[in-house]
Amino acid sequence: PQQEECRSMPEQTIADIIIEKLSVPLGPNVAKMAIRSFAKKNGASGPEKLTIADVPKIVDEIRPMLNVMIGKAPTDAMLTDITRLGPA
């Protein structure tokens, strides 16, 4: 008989969720670098320390890069999706 392993999945951080979304157009390495850079620039000890309150600032900061890399319409759609993670 097979035994079911009971493992809890670690909860995703805000950074993990944003990196996952940015990985589609940017690739995982560039997405991680962008979020790591944002965290460092904004005084967080690491991306895992980012909170929902940081989402609007992240969106404002990555918008210009995304506009250049993927265009305005895709950027607006992606950042609207990411903004939904932020404070209500």
Image: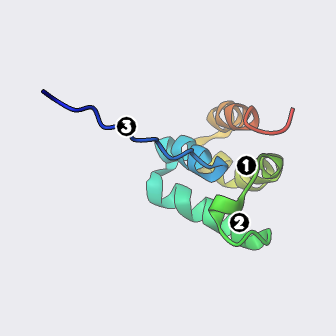
The Cα atoms of the two marked residues, 2 and 1, are separated by 16 Å
> In the rendered structure, are the residues bearing label 3 and label 2 in contact, judged by CB atoms less than 8 Å apart?
no
Name the residue type under label 3: Cys
Task: Check the image and report above or below for 14 versus 35.
Answer: above
**Earlier-in-chain disc, 3 versus 1:** 3
Instruction: State the mark number for residue 6.
Output: 3
* Residue annotated with mark 2: 39
- Closest to the camera, between mark 2 and mark 1, is 2
| Residue 77 position in % (x across, y down) | 67, 30
| Element on which disc 3 rests | loop
- Which residue is painted at 67% across and 46% down in the image? 67
| Element on which disc 2 rests | helix
- Which residue is painted at 54% across and 55% down in the image? 31
Q: Toward which corner of the image does residue 78 lie, by quadrant? A: top right
* Quadrant in which the N terminus is drawn: top left
- Closest to the camera, between mark 3 and mark 1, is 3
Name the residue type under label 2: Ala
Name the residue type under label 1: Arg
Instruction: State the mark number for residue 63.
Output: 1
**Earlier-in-chain disc, 3 versus 2:** 3
- Closest to the camera, between mark 3 and mark 2, is 3
The Cα atoms of the two marked residues, 3 and 1, are separated by 40 Å
Instruction: State the mark number for residue 77.
Output: none
The number of discs equals 3
User: Which one is in front, 34 or 75?
Assistant: 34
Task: Check the image and report above or below for 69 versus 88.
Answer: below
| Residue 7 position in % (x across, y down) | 39, 41
**Earlier-in-chain disc, 2 versus 1:** 2
* Quadrant in which the C terminus is drawn: top right
Crowdedness of circle 2 by 10 Å Cα count: few (<14), some, many (20+)? many
